[in-house]
Amino acid sequence: MKHSIKRQFALIFIGVMAGVILLCLSINHLFLEQYYIRSKTTVIYDAYHVISEAANSDVYGTEEFAEQLNDVCRIYNITICIMDSDSQMKYVSVNGGRALEAQLFGYFFGLSDDSGAKVLREGEGYVIQRISVGEDEYLEMYGGLSSGIYFIMRTPVESIRESAKIANRFYAYVGIAGALAGGILVWFASGKLTRPILELNRISEQMVHLDFEAKYQGNAHNEIGLLGENINKLSESLEKSISELKTANNELQKDIEKKERIDEMRKEFLANVSHELKTPIALIQGYAEGLSEGVNDDPESREFYCEVIMDEAYKMNNMVKKLLTLNQLEFGNDIVSMERFDITALIRNYLQSAAILTKQNEIMVEMKEYPAIYVWADEYKTEEVFMNYFSNAMNHCDGEKKITVSLEQGEEKVRISVFNTGERIPEESIGHIWEKFYKVDKARTREYGGSGVGLSIVKAIMESMNQKYGVENQKDGVLFWFELESGSKSGGASSAELLS
């Protein structure tokens, strides 16, 4: 990551450390020497007090006094020379005190040229100044005490400068090493800190793509841990909300599709009804006008005209009833009443009632002698399904003019089949025969008064009971079938029986 927090932490730490080091070096360069000089001035002044107190006490000139001054010279790198009023040297430090005797005599007798000296402090009986001797520079203190003792003390300033340079160099090395070591530590420490942040980033990226499976597993009890818990809660909340939205959207889509389907059905219904009613209405209107105008005055013609009008009105009434039935089935307004009944008895009763029609059309109906076979279904709707199949078989029966009704009982289902001899259904029409107003042979359908709604009613009834139905082309005719839930385990059939 180009602008990672880990890298930023390390760079900020190194930058701060570098700034602190530069600040320290600048302060050392500007103020360390002055601080050292003040410190040395204080040390020289303290040594002056030691000499002053010793001069006013009994220890002056003793070995104890000499040892005390030796310690001061050794510790603070100070050169000391002391003499009394008789010009006798009372103490000369071993680190170059003899070189100061001439300078002390010069100050005492006023023979020294101190015009190049810079006075730093001046008090009663002493002067502290910076002087140059050749290429060297010193911090010097000289003066006299009331007891007649004269002294001079000197410490080199060059050592102070050298110490400052060494200290600055040491600070720089230590600072650079500390900055690098600190940067490495910060790099690894920030890596531990940013690892859960990167994990949260990965989870958030998955959430962007609507993947809510990943959850934050960290157990840190800090702000990042709290953020991870809130991310998990947000993920659960979003998943729930999106699920609800998808459910609502799916329901809305279904409602839209249902509305569109209803609109299409309404348009199709109006178009088909208009088309189907156009011919009978035209016939009724034509024959009614003929009667009104007295086209044929003989009783037989008037009776024929009236029969045509009545027949067409009957067809229209029958079609409207079927359309109303189909409408109730398709919109779920018709209640399916499931009950257990004998399907054999229902079919046999219907065939007996339709015997007169089959005789008129010279159709032979064949059905084996079946025992009582019980099924679970809506008895009224089942009879309507069989009636539509049988009516369709009669209207299309040809050739041998035979209709065969058969029942086949399985463990869970009972299949009822109606076969009629005649022309087979074209393969391209098999998938459309269940559609409203679809007619394979429109001329023949018109001949027997079919509306093209019967098989649509079959489809609606069978789907309302969640049962299967279908059609098959046979060698010499067409077989329609439907299935119902079995209500008994008895079965079998005896020899065939000719009903008509």
Image (cartoon, rainbow, N blue to C red):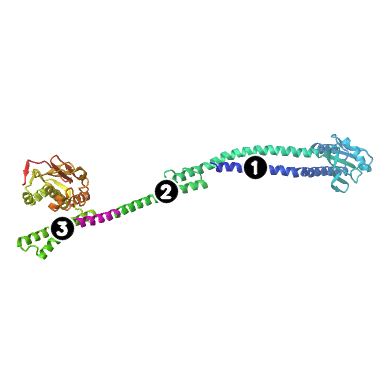
Neighbours of disc 2 within 10 Å: few (<14), some (14-19), many (20+) = some
Residue 268 position, x and y percent, is 24, 54
Please give the range of residues in magenta: 260-275
Q: Which residue is mark 2?
A: 236
Q: Is residue 269 magenta?
A: yes
Sooner in the amino-acid sequence: mark 2 or mark 3: 2
**Residue 23 x, y percent position in the rendering:** 69, 44
Let me know if residue 277 is in the magenta part.
no
Mark 3 highlights which residue?
Answer: 280
Classed neighbour count for the residue bearing mark 1: other residues with Cα under 10 Å, few (<14), some (14–19), many (≥20): some
Label 3 amino acid? Pro
The reply to whether residue 175 is in sight is yes
Q: Residue at point 87% right, 46% down?
A: 126
Q: For this rendering, which residue is in front, 58 or 102?
A: 102
- Image position of 233 (left or right of 290): right
Residue, disc 1: 17
Instruction: For marks 2 and 3, give the CA distance.
Output: 65 Å
Q: At label 2, which amino acid type do we have?
A: Glu
- Residue at the far top in the pictured view: 94
The residue closer to the viewer here, 43 or 13, is 13
Q: Secondary structure at mark 1?
A: helix
Q: Residues within 10 Å of mark 3 (few under 14, many from 20)?
A: some
> Is the C-beta separation of discs 1 and 3 under 8 Å?
no
Q: Please state if 127 lies on the left or on the right of 226 as rendered.
A: right
